[in-house]
Amino acid sequence: MRNFTYLSRFWQYLLAFVLIASLTALFFSLRNVLDTTLIALLYLMPLGVITAVWGLGPGITSALITFLSLNYFFIQPYYTFLVHQPTDIVILMVFLMVAIVISQLVGQAKAGLAAATASEREATQLYELSTALTGSHDEDAIAQILAKQVHAVAECEYIELTITGARPFVYQLPESSSPARPPELIVPIEAARGLLGEIRLWRTTPMISSGERRLFQTFASQGALALERAWLAQAEARARVLEESDRLKSAILSSVSHELRTPLSTIKAAASSLRGREVRWDSPARVELVAAIDDEADHLNMLVGNLLDISRIESGVLKPKRDWNILSEIVGSVLGRMKHLAETHRIEVDVPESLPLVPVDYVQLEQVFTNLVSNSLKYAPVDSVICIRAQVEEEESIHVQVSNQGPQVPAEDLERIFDKFYRITAADRVTGTGLGLSICKGIVEAHGGHLWAENLSDGLAFNFTLPLIWDGTKPPQFPMDAETE
Amino acid sequence: MSNAPHILVIDDEPQILRAMRTILTEKQFRVTTASRGEEGLTLAATNEPDLIILDLGLPDMDGVDVCRRLREWTQIPIIILSVRDSERDKVAALDQGADDYLTKPFGIEELLARVRVALRHSAHALSVQGAQSKVVKAGSLVIDLAWHIVKRGEEEIKLTATEYKLIAYLAANHGRVLTHRSILTQVWGAADADHTEYLRVYMRQLRKKLETDPERPQFILTEPGIGYRFIADE
């Protein structure tokens, strides 16, 4: 780089000499036409150009060469360097003055231009940095961007960026280890709340100028601002999560306390009236009260079970204990248990025995069917039909549908009915914690399946899929009639 | 009164102990209670009760361990108590030799039915294998374990060898829960103890042949996550 400057300087002198020599040759050929004064004036042109383009050194050299050429070729006596008249001295002085004045003017203009270019470049670099930093809320990314920009602008051999704080880390460019000597420049990354880290820079040549130092400090403070912004955004996100979980907790509390108190009040009222001998020993009311206590205790047990299930699903400890099971057996067992509940509706089952065995947790799948059917019982009108169907889908999974002739769900709520504590109708019309469907979803998903709701022309359907492949194994099949007595 | 069966209840919750003592005393049983596992083991050794009701969630010991330590020296029937969703523990305790289980909260009829079955099986174990225990009746079904015949009314039902082995094991232990593992080991052998799918398929076949409505069985009941139970006439 430096050799190149020397070379070009040599070429400048050479070119200046060549230019003046060729003009001298031109003027010499016109010596008889042109007046000496005119030639002297014409010589000012190359002189001005050379000084303006190449600066003072070539300018003064050219002034001397021009004066000598003029003296030798055009001022009498010709072909001598002798100075006979004072006017010749004046011409020399004028040439030199012109060279000096022009070079000064051009020099000033150039310096101004260089300063303007430099400050424009600085502004561009800062702009690039701040654009890159905008929208990045990740400390690592910010550090990386900052280090890369400083590295590119400084053209340094090595850079190390250290971030202190809650999660300290170091970012280095290039990734090899740092030079053995201490860094040439250390720029602190400082923000309102103190030192956030520092940039360490290794560059011997050229020396780091005060302008660069100032630029890197600006870079560092931009980085500090971005880091602070990132930390604030993270703090805000955390606060939002806390707020959300707080809101959920109070929803749970209010729902749970309401739901638990209802059966408890019934039990308390019935038990205390039995105890207080207000009800006669043989009164039919006694049977009623005892039945109420029994039923409400079951209800309470179910609520507590649901709460336990949902907390298990939430914390991800709900692990299905799979076995090869017969789906129709599970459905049958659920309906058998719900017999007294299901007297109000007609239940149609189309779960063929020919279905392959399904790899599911028997107890959990029973719960899915129980919840889906009891949801249908709750919402669908009395005497309507509840339908349970199952069929194989593409040999890899089984598709189950539990449909009812109950009210439809607005399209925008079809997803949300599986949210915890979400109920579409007024809470006082239908009892329950609003957990049944979320538990179903949790269980089906834990089995690798998918559960969704869909509006039918005359009601609502719950659909779910269950994979038939378990650890890469297809359902076992038995030649059952091969063995005979 | 001194001939009344003696029941040892091991549970750490005083309310449960209070309720059990009241109910069982009312039903003419003698009742001893223990609130810790070690205490229960000592009382079992010194009092030699006829039946032990054991809660799986004890503060000092794992209920399954209590079960195992009891089985090291006695065949006293054990009924375990546990909460819902702990099928694994229940199965572990049953495979360690417990006779039956009850899930909290339970109804009193259920408790008494389990107690009756457990006491009867222990009596059988002690008695010389009498001829009357060789025929099990369930509704119109008659299972003759001596002659290897299963009949509905007067009509004989054709069963395959495996099906017969299965129903014979269930019927001989009627009223008692049998875990998948115990049935598989008994009927197919220890090597097939994990093949629950055999059980599912054969049980379906058996229900088709024996039950009036195979989807809503009356005799061969599924105990979700645990095993099966055969219900016979008392």
Image (cartoon, helix red, strand yellow):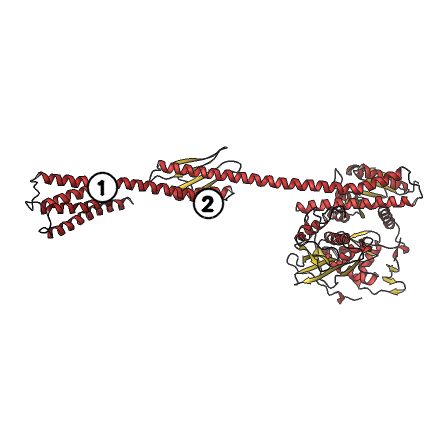
B229 up-or-down from A113: above or below: below
Question: CB of mark 2 within 8 Å of CB of mark 1?
Answer: no
Mark 1, chain letter?
A: A
- At x 93%, y 44%, the residue is A283
Q: Chain of mark 2?
A: A
- Mark 1: which amino acid? Ile
Q: Which mark is residue A102?
A: 1
Left or right placement of residue B181 versus residue A148 in this view: right
Q: Residue furthest left?
A: A77
How far apart in space, not on screen, are marks 2 and 1 (Cα)?
44 Å
Q: Which residue appears at 87% of the width and 41% of the height? A: B23
Q: Nearer the viewer, residue A228 or A439?
A: A228
- Classify B141 as above or below A45: below
> Looking at this view, is A330 or A69 the one in front?
A69
Q: Is residue B191 above or below residue B17?
A: below
Q: Where on the picture, by quarter, is residue B80? A: top right
Dot 1 falls on a residue whose secondary structure is helix
Front in this rendered view, residue A466 or B64: A466
Q: Position of residue B213 (x, y in %)?
A: 82, 61
In the visual, does B203 lie left or right of A81?
right
x and y, in percent, of residue B209 in the image: 82, 63
Circle 2 sits in a helix, a strand or a loop, which is it?
helix
**Looking at the image, can residue A181 be seen?**
no
Pick whichever of labels 2 and 1 is earlier in the sequence.
Answer: 1
Tag 1: Cα neighbours inside 10 Å, few (<14), some, or many (≥20)?
many
**Count of numbered badges drawn on the protein:** 2
Q: Quadrant of the N terminus of chain B?
A: top right
Give me the disc on residue A132. Answer: 2
